[in-house]
Amino acid sequence: MLKQQARLFTKLSILVDLIVVLGAFYGAYRVRAPAGGLSAFKDYLWVMLVVVPTWYFLLARYGLYASIRTTPLRQLLVSLLKVHVIGGVIVASTIFLLEPRGFSRFLFGYFLAFSFLLLSLEKVTIKLGLGYIRVLGYNFRNILIVGTEEKARDFVRLIEEHADWGLRLVGLIRMWDDEIISDLHEYPVVGKLDELVVICRQNPVDEVVFCVTKESVAELEEAILSLEEMGITVRMLLDFYDVSASRTELSLFHGEIPMLTFYSKTFDAEQLLLKRFLDIIGAMVGLVLTVLLFPFIVLAIKLDSPGPLFFFQERVGENGRIFKCWKFRSMYVDAEERKKELLHLNEMNGALFKIRNDPRITRVGAFLRRTSLDELPQFWNVLRGEMSLVGTRPPTPDEVAIYENWQRRRICIKPGITGLWQVSGRNEIRHFDEVVRLDLEYIDRWNLWLDIKILLKTVLVVFARTGSC
């Protein structure tokens, strides 16, 4: 995933740089043109055929397409200055050879100045902006460190020095029973190695980083396999580890520490970005539809039964994150209390609760569920980034508490309003393991086209009024 994200950010950076360079050249022309002596702008555009590849080569050569989060600002500006000095000489020499009538030196000089200033502004803004967002606590990863010795201390120190990396340390796990350390750099030691799986089940953990010695490696295989089974990313501060895994990646963590990563899922970063765009567009369309239908749904719910308009419930999102899932109320207000009386009628085998002709559902609620109109407020969850249009069904914390390890992998991605289970005849499924199997199949097969197909099938299911519950 690190490599995929790096490739995506590199492509986006190249695109933004191209726009900036073209904008700098146009700005230079607009500043120089009033002085006279220039022909039409299109007559000078040919020089971009030399500038663009030259700038790209030099920007890559001086590391400006690698991660700049750990690059000091001074070094960043010096690298950009080198690009423009060397690039200016190369392009000026090319212009001299290809343009015998001469080229406006002021135009080219203005371009170099504008390009340096705009590229500097772009890179510095990106660096400071992303760093500030991470310092505020957004776009972060929850990590748990296994180990309390020197390797772990060095890693903790590195994280403390770079808050802009977006890593939030949940705590540390000690390897041995005889270790009496209770905290490290003010971070708590939350348990022992044999408690690792339980701790990950009880806390939102995105990644577990093993900072251990070579002698300890043989004792970790069971823990690593359990974490993989749960869908949690595993990293190890070692440059080797001989274990059979479906997906692995050997890389340098921020160019400093050798690390081997085991992935239970590998999603293409570009398609994930497109998925988020699709979610935002779909959420906005869904919220507009919600506003249009809102007066009619409000009137129907209020006339049908007393109680609030909305129902919200805590659900478990990606890797254990808790969020409030919103719906239009479709049950009587005492539905949760009456659930205990109906548990013996549960038609599902496993963690789900479902009965046909549920007496807790109101008359209007039954219609809202058949047409899936009760789920319209979830578009707000999608817009907030807590859910996706397509994903796995969002479970409750009580359900997750009794999951087996292999079942927890279904929460390693964002839940969705719809999903493979919903369009696969969910009324006919009676075993929770089959629900999980469909969710894991979605995770393993995922691509953007699969999301689009599921969305189209969902529309057909809703209009045919099949598969609703």
Image (cartoon, helix red, strand yellow):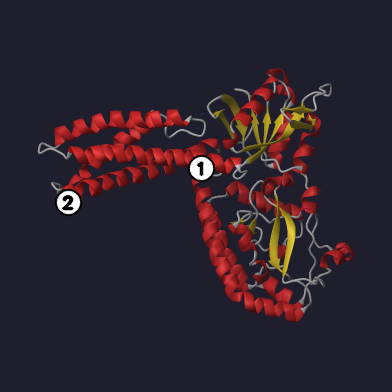
Callout 2 crowding tier (Cα within 10 Å): few <14, some 14–19, many ≥20: few
Q: Which of the numbered marks, if any, corresponds to residue 129? A: 1
Mark 1 residue type: Gly
State the residue lying farthest toward the front: 35
Q: CA distance from mark 2 to mark 1?
A: 38 Å
Quarter of the figure with residue 353: bottom right
Tag nearer the camera, 2 or 1: 1
Q: Residue at x 42, y 33 (%)?
A: 64
Mark 2 residue type: Ala
Relative to the observer, which residue lies in front, 143 or 101?
Answer: 101
- Can residue 242 be seen here? The reply is no
Q: Which of the numbered marks, if any, corresponds to residue 40? A: 2
Q: Residue at x 77, y 25 (%)?
A: 175
Residue 165 in the figure: left or right of residue 13: right
Residue 236 in the figure: left or right of residue 315: left
Residue 152 in the figure: left or right of residue 58: right
